[in-house]
Amino acid sequence: MEWKTNIPPTILITGSTGFVCRYLVTKILLNSNFNIVLTYRVKKGNYNKNNRLSFEKADLLKPQSFEGIFSKYNPKYVVHLAAMARVSDGENYPVEVLKTNYIATITLSELSIKYKVESMVFTSSNLAQDAVSVVGICKLLVEQYFQKLNSQTTKFISLRMPNVIDSNGAVTLIFKKQIENDNPITITHPDMSRMFITGERAADFLYFLVKHGANKGVYVSYEKPVKITDLAENMIKESGKHIKIDFIGKKRGEKLTEKSFTLNEVITTDISGLGMIKEYKYELNYLKAAMEILNDKEDILSDKDIQNSFKKL
């Protein structure tokens, strides 16, 4: 799907070192004449030199560091990929994860309105469904916050990104390393299941939503979850080795399964497997319950910035 305009617009993408970001940048360079601004916190992502690529340093823990970037480039589109995405990070560093994933995203949405961005695509997660982990609740809070925004200029779109195969921290990478080293494959529970997607397909979803996503839409992959044990057994079989599987027990904040949406629950799109949840709306009681889970943690309850941000919901 080519997308070229007379005057090349600028797209701002956060998280230049991310696995999906590389696929998205490749797709944009091949299929559009966009100029791309990529943000980084410590080091730039590794990309071939291209005069359509620019890099800017910014820190989600200091979200106002993004204002100068908006002012300098006046982006027409924003794709927000950067996050602390591991469930374990949320359980071990809840305040930092809330500020990175939730408060910073609110600031980016406010900047998007201020600078009249046409669309902002936020990478949510399947963890937002029936959220129990800090990371999942952060994603849910952003989705719900978007439902309250009434901008005349900017669309706010959420994509619940499935687990991306071979991305940083992905179970597929962990299993590959364990097999390579002839170590047992470790799985938390025999019935654990997750939804998976390739980097190329994730980029397809994001690229499509930048232009075609509906305001306040929450998009999901409606393909079936994969049982982690089946995935491990297939990888062992492909390796030709005799590797055993050890079940080590669920981690804090971890769900056993991910909800799979049926065709009756989504509005399908022109991209196979991608749909928008029907009748997704702001639910105050659900939000209150989620925030109560967070406020059980004393360091969250005592943080004024976080408590003030909750009021925006």
Image: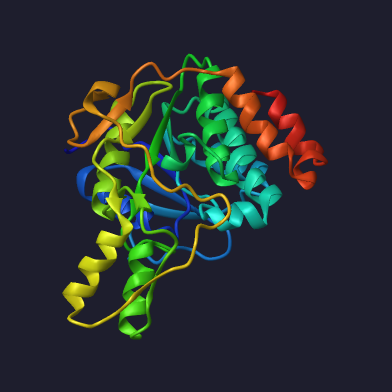
Q: Position of residue 3 (x, y in %)?
A: 22, 36
Q: Would you say 303 lies left or right of 87 here?
A: right
Residue 282's x, y, as percent? Answer: 52, 18
Can residue 291 be seen here? The reply is yes
Residue plotted at (53% across, 66% down) = 43
Quick one: 297 or 162, which is closer to the camera?
297
Query: Dividing the image into 4 quarters, which one contains the N terminus?
Result: top left
Colour style of the rendered protein structure: rainbow
Q: Quadrant of residue 47?
A: bottom left
Relative side of 184 to 138, left or right: left
Query: In which quadrant of the rendered view does residue 287 lie?
Result: top right
| Image x and y of residue 20, in percent | 36, 54
As displayed, is residue 110 above or below residue 13? above
Front-most of 138 and 106? 138
The C terminus: image quadrant: top right
Q: Please tell me whether residue 235 is drawn above or below residue 279 in the rendered image.
A: below
Q: Is residue 147 above or below residue 255?
A: above
Residue 256 at x, y = what percent? 43, 48
Q: Is residue 5 visible?
A: no
Point 21% across, 37% down: residue: 273
| Foreground residue among 120 and 237 | 237
Asked if residue 251 lies left or right of residue 289, the reply is left
| Nearer-the-camera pick, 59 or 240 | 240
Q: Residue at x 41, y 26 (%)?
A: 118
Which residue is rendered at x = 28% and y = 27% of the image? 212
